[in-house]
Image: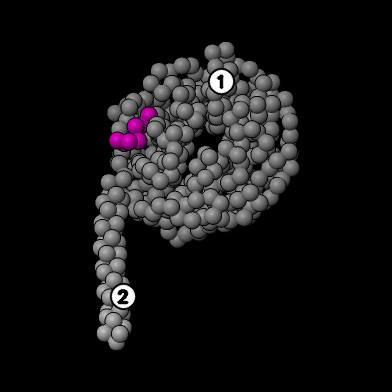
Amino acid sequence: MSLRLSLAPTRVLLLVAAAILLGALGILLLSARTLTDRLSLFHDLPLPAGSSDVLLSRGGTLAVIATVTFDREGGRPARVLQVVDPRASRAVWRRWLPAPACCALPVLAMTPGGDMIALGGAEQTDVYNRQGVRLFATGLDDGRLHSAADIDNAGRWLVIGEWEGTLAAFESGRGRLWMRSGGESVMAVAVAGSGGVVAAALRDRVLLLRLGDGAALHEIPYGPARIAAVSISADGTLVGLVWKREDGRMVAEALSGGRRRWTRVLGPGSVPLLQMDEQGRWLAVGDLLGRQAALLGPRGEATWRAPGPERVAAAVAPDGRWFAIARGAVIEVRMLPSGRIVWRGRSPGTVHLLRLAGGRLAVLGSADPDAGIPDRAWFAYISSLR
C-alpha cells in the first residue's frame, strides 16, 4: 500500500511534466506559424506619391485606390484610379486622369460589390465599371470642382457636391435628376444604400434630402466647421458626422430624425476621417495625420480610443461585427460589441489608413515612420473573420 501511495504522486508529476512539455511545444509551433503568417499575410503594392484613399468591396475580393499626384512625364497634376486584386496586390487596371492640383484629397465612391466606381475631384465625376470601362461622366458645366461624391448600393443614383455649395443628383443612363444650391461649402455627401436619402455636410448644417427630387427632409445646424466627413446608414435613418471646430478640436455626432442622438468632443486633429457600419451603430473616427482614432458605440461610448504620439487608425466592417485598430505598425482586429481581440499582426510599415470587409484588411501606409503620406498599400486575408 505504501509503495502504491509513493508511486501515485510520481505518476501524476510525470503526467504534468509531459503535459507542460507538449504545451510548450505547441506554443512554439503556434508562434512559429503565427510569425510565418504575419510575414506572408501582407501583399505589397507601391503607390504614386500623393494623397490616397482605398475602398474594399463588401466581399473583400476587390479594392479600389485613388491617388492625387503629379505626373512627371506629363508635367501636370493627375488623379490615378486603380482597381486592385487584393489577393495578390496586383493592379487589374489603372487610369490616369487630369487633376486641378496635386495637393487635393481624393474623391472616391463605390457600390458595395465594386460594380460601379466614381472618381470626383475635378470639373466632372467619372464613373467606371469594375472592368475599367467608363460608363458615363457627370458635370454641371460651371467650371467648379466636385468636392464630394457618393453612389447608392445598386449604382442607380450618383450625388455630387461642389465646394461652392451646389448639390446635384444623377440617375445612371438618364442624366441629371435635380440640382440645388445650398449657399455654403459642400464638404461631404453620403447616399443611403437603399437610395432614398442623401446626407450633405455643409459648413454650418447637415441637410437630409429626398434622393428622388432633392426635397429637404431635415436640416440640423452645427459648427461652423472648418472641414467635415459624413456617413449614413443603409436605410437612411441614422447619420454619422465628424467635423473640425475653429479651435482645431474634432467633434463626433450621431443624428436621427432631424435631431442629435449624442455628441462627443475629441482632441485636436487635421482632416477628419469617418467610417460607419451599414446599420449606423458604430463610428470609426480618426484624422488624416493619425493623431487620434476611436471606435464609438451606439450611445457615443468609446469602445476603443487612442491618442498619439504613435500614429493611430481605426476601421469598422460594413456588417458591424468587427473593427480594426492600428498603433504604428501593429494592427488588431476585434469583435463587436465585446472588443475581444481575434487577430493581431504587424504590417510592413506604419499604418495611415485601414479598411476592413469580407475578411480582408486593406492598409495604406509607409515603411518610413515619419512619412506624411502613404506610399504603399498592403492587403491581408484573415480567415477567422469569414
Q: Is residue 135 left or right of residue 3?
A: right
Provide the residue span drawn in magenta: 83-89
**Secondary structure state at the residue bearing disc 2:** helix
Q: Which one is in front in this view, the residue at disc 1 or the one at disc 2? A: 2
Q: Is residue 3 above or below residue 202?
A: below
Q: In this view, does 18 lie above or below 150?
A: below
Residue visible at 58% across and 17% down in the picture: 171
The residue pinned by badge 1 equals 156
C-alpha gap between disc 1 and disc 2: 70 Å
Is 112 in front, or is 176? Answer: 112
Residue 242 position in % (x across, y down):
60, 45
- Identify the mark nearer the N-term, 1 or 2: 2
* Residue 77 visible in the shown view: no
The disc label shown at residue 12, or none: 2
Residue 37 position in % (x across, y down):
29, 49
Amino acid beneath label 2? Val
| Crowd class of label 1 (few under 14; some 14 to 19; many from 20; radius 10 Å) | some
Amino acid beneath label 1? Arg
Residue 223 position in % (x across, y down):
67, 46
